[in-house]
Amino acid sequence: MEKNIAHMDLDSFFVSVERLRNSSFEGIPLIIGGTGDRGVVASCSYEARAFGVRSAMPVKMARQLCPGAVIIRGDSQLYSHYSHVVTDIIADSVPLYEKSSIDEFYLDLTGMDRFFGCWQIALNLKDRIQKESGLPISFGLSANKTVSKIATDEAKPAGQKHVLYGTEKPFLAPLSVQKIPGVGNETYKTLRGLGIKLIHTVQQMPLELMEKTLGKPGKDIWKKGNGIDNSPVVPYQERKSLSTERTFEKDTIDVPRLESILVAMAENLAYQLRKGNKVCACVAVKIRYSDFNTHTQQIRIPYTSADHVLIRHVKELFRKLYNRRLLVRLVGVRYSELVTGSLQMNMFEDSEEMVNLYQAMDRIRNRYGDSAVKRAIGMGAKTIGRSDNPFDGGPPPLLANRRS
Amino acid sequence: MKFIAPSNELLQHLLTVNGAIMSKPLIPILENFLFDIKGNKLTIFSTDLETSMTTEMPVEAKDDVKVAVPSKMVIDILRSLPDQPVTFNVDENNYGIEVINNNGRYKMAGQDGVDFPNLPEKSGDGSFVVPSNVLLRAISKTLFATGNDELRMNLTGLYLEMKNDQVNFVATDANKLVRFTRKDLKPGVEDSFIIPKKPLNLLKTALPNDDTPVTVDYNKTNVFFSFGGTQLICRLLDEKYPDYNAVIPSENPNTLNISRGDFLSSINRISIFASRTTHQIRLKITGNELQISAEDIEMANEAQEKLACEYEGEDMEIGFNARFLKDMLATLDGDQVQMRLSQPNRAGLLVPVENEKDEDVTMLIMPMMLNNY
């Protein structure tokens, strides 16, 4: 059956939100990202893009390209608030949608054409979002997710595009292969090495050749390039892991400080586990040295959500991992193998007092926020924490420096 | 040099000690049995360097010899023969072994028995005697509760604690614990050691289920179990056992008496619907009714049953791992069991309402923390 899937994407989302709050940002090159020299661009206005500024570019470089730009720090809580506002409007208007990131949505409008036509419904929804939230949004409409996403990209900013059923191939043909979701810098280089620049060329190639040269991803790229994508719109995403990481303003070899940050991360993530009624069976610690060499180490443990067990493993992993006597740029903690369930008590390690203490601390956090009470060792790390519920089925939050 | 043995009897002896042989040992000769013939007596040895077994039987022999015999081959050929006297012909120059019977001859390569590692000398610091069926019972009541975590080696074995007038067999993996006490064993000294799991499994299959006396000799590094002509020697775990007595609650005021069979089959049904990874079930006790329930939110499964019970104490709701409860209930004897509880975040006890004579079984289970605060 022919499907109708729309992809909606808020235009330069962070910038639009900042402009709602402060109208003097209108019409000027605005960059949101780390204000220090280490930061990267999280989002930038179209005025800044004209100078060549792009997301994920170091702020230092952006400043050179566009000396007149205003650079501000992001406010992730404000962005996730506006993201929720838009989500609520969409949830109110369409039966089936998938929130694939903080500012992107897939809408399955199949069957809705019996009313006013899918195009009209999507247009009305776009107007409604712009009116009610004040944020500009673009959308693409076609028979599948990939083509709609590419169409949105073509329609931006504040536009819309309808790729009619059967016209997917001619629509994609003149575009660069870089437009295919999943083709990053590395794949693009490989493809250029093969003399492939436009999607048209991909469409002319036999599938076997793509698979032979690029492996399994080659098959996906070929399918997407031909406008074939059968993936469904998934309304709920199961969280597979909980993680957090921190890049330092300045690289450090201050081991006690690194440990205190890791403990704060371990403790905060453990609280999130318990809040979601989860236990985890795998702990991983990540270190990035100043030379960008990144190492991770993980360990499987019996299912747990207890602070003292998780903190102990995080510390042990860090001690095993940190052996290069080099400056550290980033540390992170990840818990995976999550399942719903409760902590199995251990007769030698867990005491009744400890369990009562955790429950009391969790109650304080539930009421006054997750940094209301914490271990003294982690008090130096002020910015670790999260306000939203990680298990609400939404996509993992985008880390500011990781906008792909 | 030659000896003659009845094939079935020899096979039975080989199978008794076969368990100590590893499939791919580090030292190739350990894939063999050592046949040691002195006078008209054959002693068979097997070892993996941690656990060793020996057994003996009479044979007809002219000279003494020590030879290593490939274990799999000799067992396979004896197994496929009808019962009959079999002649073994050992070539003392190259240790080739020829098996001769009515049908024909089979030849295999043996090795010089001198190359076989020496077994620990039986030198006991202490010893006591226990009937085979009692030891068997102690092992089968406790073994399931031992741990598998190699980071906590001390919990992977069975703790044997001798008191002046009783012996405690204790096993725990830190989530559940079993203490099996025999009051008819009176070692007369206070001592203790930890036996690893593998030799206990061997012992379980080797011990006869009757009152054959088993002599237990032990020293700092090894323990020797001797019964009939068979001996099992194993290296002890050189670890410290945790103070388990400290975690067994002495006062659990809330008591629940229930039929063991009903409780077990109810948990068997409910646990089908519990989470496959955590096996969490919930017991809710109000008045004289026990409600058992489970839910698997991820798979949208849930189940609930109600059972009649005799309960004295405050109403409570407590979470347990269903697999632990199942193992414990299946291991206990008797029609009625008693659960003694105090708080949802404290250890629960499970005991038979009536213990066998001279016996005391206590099982402890740690709860799972239910998040209902």
Image (spheres, coloured by chain):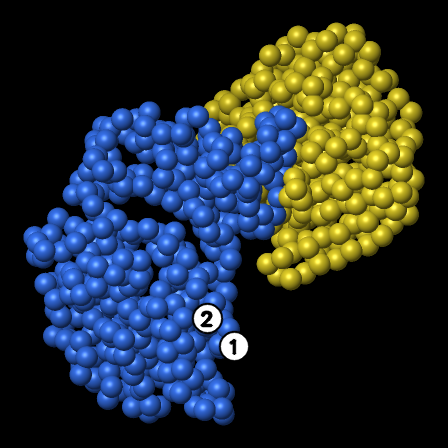
Residue bearing the label numbered 2: A89
Image height of A39 relative to B216, above or below: below
Snapshot quadrant of residue A345: top right
Residue bearing the label numbered 1: A95
Taking the image as shown, residue A247 lies to the left or right of residue B340, namely: left
Taking the image as shown, residue A165 lies to the left or right of residue B127, namely: left
The three-letter amino acid code for the residue at tag 1 is Pro
* Residue A126 visible here: yes
User: Going from the N terminus, do you reach mark 1 or mark 2 first?
Assistant: 2
The three-letter amino acid code for the residue at tag 2 is Ile
Q: Which chain is blue?
A: A
Rendered-image quadrant of the N terminus of chain B: top right
Give the foreground label among 1 and 2: 2
The answer to which of B183 and B349 lies nearer the viewer is B349
Image height of A185 relative to B134, above or below: below
How far separated are the C-alphas under marks 1 and 2?
Answer: 12 Å
